[in-house]
Amino acid sequence: MTAVTHTAVSNTLVILAASPVFAAVLSSIFLGDRIKPLTWGASLLILCGVAAILRGSLGGPGLEGDLAALAASLSTAGMLVVLRHHPGADPVPGLALGGLAAALLVAPGVGRFVPSAHDLALLMLLGLVLLPVAIGLITRGPSHLPAPEVGLIMLLETILGPSWVWLVIGQQPSRVALLSGGLIVSVLALHSSLALRAELRVERAAPEARV
């Protein structure tokens, strides 16, 4: 929320799209996972795209939002690593407790802020319906689909999010965001496609090996 109110939505979603890369690096450090050279190469290109966005915001009002998006991306990566370390855990209760803890943390700084009835209705729709449903489905998706396929589907947010914002409120992505976003989405799509093909080959080979 801090990111989208202090920088362009396109910047926020592009930086958030890099969370799988951060997750791969963190899993290598803390879980000892062996990362393939292809993944390291993709990670380097994606980090270059994120760095380009941050560099484009230096000295401008959007830097705070970009850094908030980077912090959110790192937090998401940390969540993915924890879920990998505890594959049987249900993350939804933890997400609910995290939201409650965040609300209590920021409550003292709210002051006399009183939203209008219209804004309160939108906030309730966002906090009670859209975010819980979206995050709940995201956390449950990998248990029903191959991880590379989930990654490919998640890329739609990076593409559709800025497009909807552009159409509805006229916030046009910057040239840096478009170029960096194109690089990150292309690299992630290629990497996920290759990983999905490799996983499908293994699945097809398994029945043949048993025969």
Image (tube, helix red, strand yellow):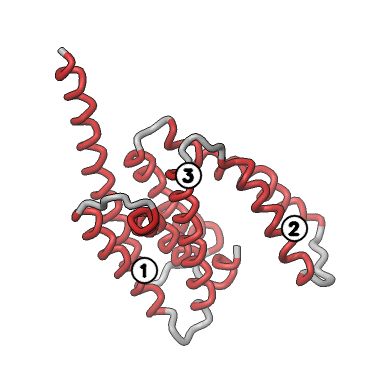
* Residue 108 vertical position relative to residue 83 in the rendered view, above or below: below
Q: Quarter of the image containing the C terminus?
A: top left
Q: Which residue is mark 1?
A: 50
Front-lying residue, 162 or 202: 202
Give the residue type at disc 1: Val
Q: Which residue is mark 3?
A: 83
Residue 127 lies, in percent from the top left, at: 68, 50
Q: Residue at x 50, y 63 (%)?
A: 9
Give the residue type at disc 2: Asp
* Residue 98 vertical position relative to residue 48 in the rendered view, above or below: above
> Do the residues bearing badges 2 and 1 touch, measured as CB atoms within 8 Å?
no
Q: How far is the residue under mark 1 from the one under mark 3?
A: 25 Å
Q: Residue at x 51, y 62 (%)?
A: 72
Disc marking residue 127: none
Q: Residue at x 67, y 49 (%)?
A: 97
Q: Which residue is mark 2?
A: 119
Q: Secondary structure at mark 3?
A: helix
Instruction: Say which of marks 3 and 2 sits in front.
Output: 3
